Amino acid sequence: MDRLTTNFAGTLFGLHGEPAHERIVVASDADSGLQAVVAVYSTVRGPAFGGCRYWQYASDYEAYHDALRLSQGMAFKNALAGLPFGGGKAVILKRPEQMDRAALFKAFGRLVESLGGMYLTAEDVGTTADDMRAVQSETAYVSGIPRENDVYGGNPSPRTAYGVFVGLKAAVQVALGRDTLDGISVAVQGLGSVGWDLCERLHRAGAELIVSDIDAAKTERAQQMFGARVADIARIASVNADVFAPCALGGSITDAVAHCQFKVIAGAANNQLMSLAEGDTLHRRGIFYAPDFLVNAGGIISCAREYLGSADKQAVLDEVAQIGPRVFELAGRVKVSGIAPARAAVVWAREMMQRV
């Protein structure tokens, strides 16, 4: 690859106590300023599919670790969704200095191309459809590109939100015995594209919303449009509500949050639990946790069908809607095994990862 330096870490590194990742690539490109990590967790089911995150991390190590955790989550997500793909993820380190964005993502596209189809990329936090177009100029191993014909593609966020809505509704039925969201209070953390779309769906379903976001303009708009109550970002995880929907960045469910008053946790954020121990605490306290890699699969389902050329709109929505029945299946597994939903979902995902 022209002037692109790569360091292949092989199978020596991975998450502590977990099977090693198949490949970890740390790459830099002096001309564009690209600094990226691509983590391939598993290709047993097929090429590793997962989005590209563009974020300003506190340290290079934090970016590296994020790629490891996110790629594992994608492997679980793709397996439970029944997709013919393994799991991978890319993170590009966002620096304070101004970058030529198009050049940056073209360099990333060359990195993806150099992997020869082992990793397929798409839009994620901090990236846009225009970024994916820049990637596409260098490689065909990319999805989430807006189409001009009848093929369903582009920004996957609406399908992610739809899947979370379906999963949340199923989780409410499991935990509260309610087949409607009318009058159910939901605390939504984060009003980005997915969080906002989820709020629209919840509002139409009659839910009572409590919202938080670092952008005051978004919470003010939610007040006006949905009659939502606004909570401070530091307190949203401790408000009195039936459901907590984390839709910001990961790690929001700490030990303190695990002692919350919610009955259900179901949201769009990846890697919500700091560890499986928090999932155990939730289970002991009678809180039903619908794992992120189960309920937020709508986006990757959309990107996968687009990539495979089978992205008919209704077919994609029907496939995303199957997240609801999977939540019911998880609840059944929890009842039989007695273990927490978080652990039961990991066991289930690992079973599915071996089915090709």
Image (spheres, rainbow, N blue to C red):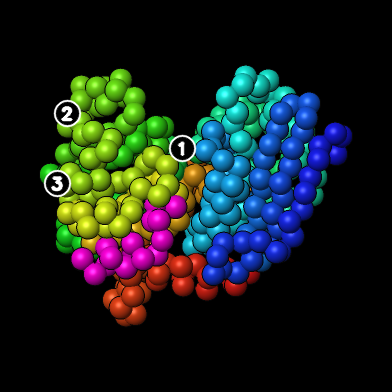
Instruction: Sort mark 3 into few (<14), some (14-19) or many (20+) by Cα contacts within 10 Å.
Output: some
Residue with the mark numbered 2: 227
Return the x and y of residue 142 as percentages of the image width and height: 67, 40
Label 1: element kind: helix
Viewer-nearest residue: 18 or 288? 18
Does residue 277 show up magenta in the picture? yes
Return the x and y of residue 266 as percentages of the image width and height: 32, 52
Residue with the mark numbered 1: 157
Does residue 79 show up magenta in the picture? no
- Whether residue 325 appears in this view of the structure is no
Magenta range: 271-286
Query: 213 above or below 270?
Result: above
Residue with the mark numbered 3: 240
Query: 329 above or below 37?
Result: below
Label 2: element kind: loop
Viewer-nearest residue: 311 or 22? 22
| Quadrant assignment for the C terminus | bottom right
Residue at 87% x, 34% y is 2
